[in-house]
Amino acid sequence: MERVVLVTGASGGVGLALCQRLLEEDGRIHLCIACRNVQKSEATRDLILATHPAAQVSTVEVDLGSLASILRAARELRCRFQRLDFVYLNAGIMPNPHVNFKALWHGLLTGKVLHMLTTAEGIMTQTDRLNGDGLQEVFATNLFGHFILVRQLQSLLCGNEKPSRLIWTSSSNARESAFSLSDYQHAKGQESYSSSKYATDLTSVVLNRKFNTQGLYSSVVCPGLVMSNMTYRILPVFLWKLLMPIMWLVWLFKQKPEYLDSLAKYHSCTSGLGKCYVEPRKMDVDEDTAEKFYQKLLELEEQTLEKYRDLLD
Ligand SMILES: NC(=O)C1=CN([C@@H]2O[C@H](COP(=O)(O)OP(=O)(O)OC[C@H]3O[C@@H](n4cnc5c(N)ncnc54)[C@H](OP(=O)(O)O)[C@@H]3O)[C@@H](O)[C@H]2O)C=CC1
Ligand SMILES: CC(C)CCC[C@@H](C)[C@H]1CC[C@H]2C3=CC[C@H]4[C@H](C)C(=O)CC[C@]4(C)[C@H]3CC[C@]12C
C-alpha cells in the first residue's frame, strides 16, 4: 500500500515546495494537503497536479487557529485513512513582525553578524493577540493546533506495521530565553514566534519519549531563510531583491569548503554508512522542561476541548 503523507500549510512557501519535492522523490505516495479553506486547497491541488499530473493528491480543510476546525479535520482524516506514515507539521505564522534596525546595525558591526542574520536573535519582535478560542494566536497556530491534531490522529500514527513520523517545521529563531513555562503562550513578551518555535522543539523531544515505543517518531527541521509570504511581510519584495547579494554572501560564508563543490547534489538524508548530508545540530532543549511543558499542554487540551465534546469520539 502507498505511503500516506499529510502536509499542513501546503498552500504556499515552504509547504508547497515540500509537496513538490516529496512527489519528485517518490511519485507513488498519497499526498494529503491541509489548507485553511476549500478554495486554497483546490488551487494548491491544481498547482501540484500541473507539475505531477499522475500524483495522488487529496485535500483536507483545517484552520490550525481553530480547535473546532482541527477536530473536524481529524475526524475526516480518521474516516478516510487507516494510517498516516508522515505528517509534516509546517503551517506557521509570524504576525506583525518588527525589525529593530538599530540592533541590526549594531549587530552588523560586531563579530556576531552571521549568527544574527541566521537566527535573527535580538533583532525581531512581533505583536500577538488572542484567537477565537481565547489562546495566543501564534502559540495556537504554530504549536498547540498541531499538538491537538497529532493527539486526535494518534490512532493513525501509533501501532502501525512500520513507524510513522512527525516532522515539525521549527526555526533557528527558536530560543530558550524567549520561552517560559509560566507564560508558555507568550502573552507577556514580544517574541511569540521564537517562543512558539522553542515550544515546538520541546514538544518534539517529549513526543519521542512518550510515543517511540508505539512506533511514532518526531523530528524538527529548520528550512533556513526562505523567501515566502512570511518574509515578504517582514520586508517588501523589492528590498529583499536588493538585499539578495548580501544574503548570498552570508550564505557563502556559512558554507564549509566541501559544500562549495559545484558538482555536488545535496540530499537531506543519511547514507548507509551513517554519513549525514545535512549537518545535524544538537537542540538546546532540557528534557525535564519538555516533560513539564507536556503536562501543561495536556491540561490546556483538557480545558479547551471541554466545550467541543460533540466533536470528539
Ligand atoms: N520563511 C522562512 O524563512 C522560514 C519559515 N519557517 C517556518 O516554515 C513554515 C512555513 O512558513 P513559510 O512557508 O515561510 O510561510 P508562508 O506564510 O508562505 O506559509 C505559511 C503556511 O501556513 C499556513 N497557515 C498559516 N496560518 C494557518 C492556519 N491558521 N491554519 C492553517 N494553515 C495556516 C498558510 O496558509 P494560508 O495560505 O492560508 O495563509 C501557509 O500555507 C512556518 O512554520 C515557518 O515558521 C522556518 C524558518 C524560516
Ligand atoms: C541583510 C541585512 C542587512 C538585512 C536583513 C535584515 C532582516 C530583515 C533579516 C536578517 C535575518 C532574517 C531572518 C533570520 C532568521 C529567520 C528565521 C529562521 C525564521 O524562522 C523566520 C524569518 C527569520 C526570522 C528572518 C527574518 C528577516 C531577518 C531578521
Image (tube, grey):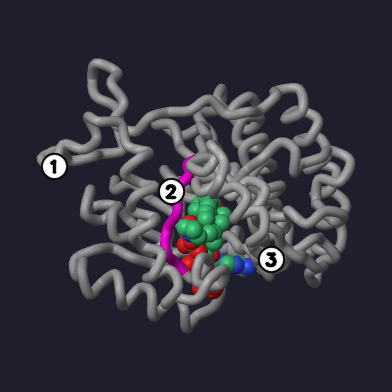
| Amino acid of disc 1 | Ser
* Tag 1 secondary structure: loop
Where, quadrant-wise, is the C terminus in this rendering?
bottom right
The N terminus lies in quadrant: top left
| Residue at numbered disc 2 | 223
Which residue is rendered at x = 44% and y = 64% of the image? 10
Residue that label 3 marks: 65
Q: Residue at x 72, y 30 (%)?
A: 290
1 or 3: mark nearer the eye: 1
Looking at this view, name the residue that lies furthest to the top: 273
- Disc 2 marks a residue whose amino acid type is Pro
Give the label, 2 or 3, closer to the camera: 2
Q: Is residue 101 left or right of residue 137?
A: left
Residue 149, percent from left and from top? 62, 53
Secondary structure at badge 2 equals: loop
- The numbered mark, 2 or 3, whose residue comes first in the sequence reads 3
Residues at discs 2 and 3 in contact (Cβ within 8 Å): no
Ligand 1 closer than 8 Å to the CB at disc 2? yes
Beta carbon at label 3 within 8 Å of ligand 1: yes
Q: Which residues are magenta?
A: 221-228
Instruction: Please report the residue visible at 81 percent of the width from the left and 66 percent of the height from the top.
Output: 133
Beta carbon of the mark 1 residue lies under 8 A of ligand 2: no
Residue indicated by mark 1 = 262
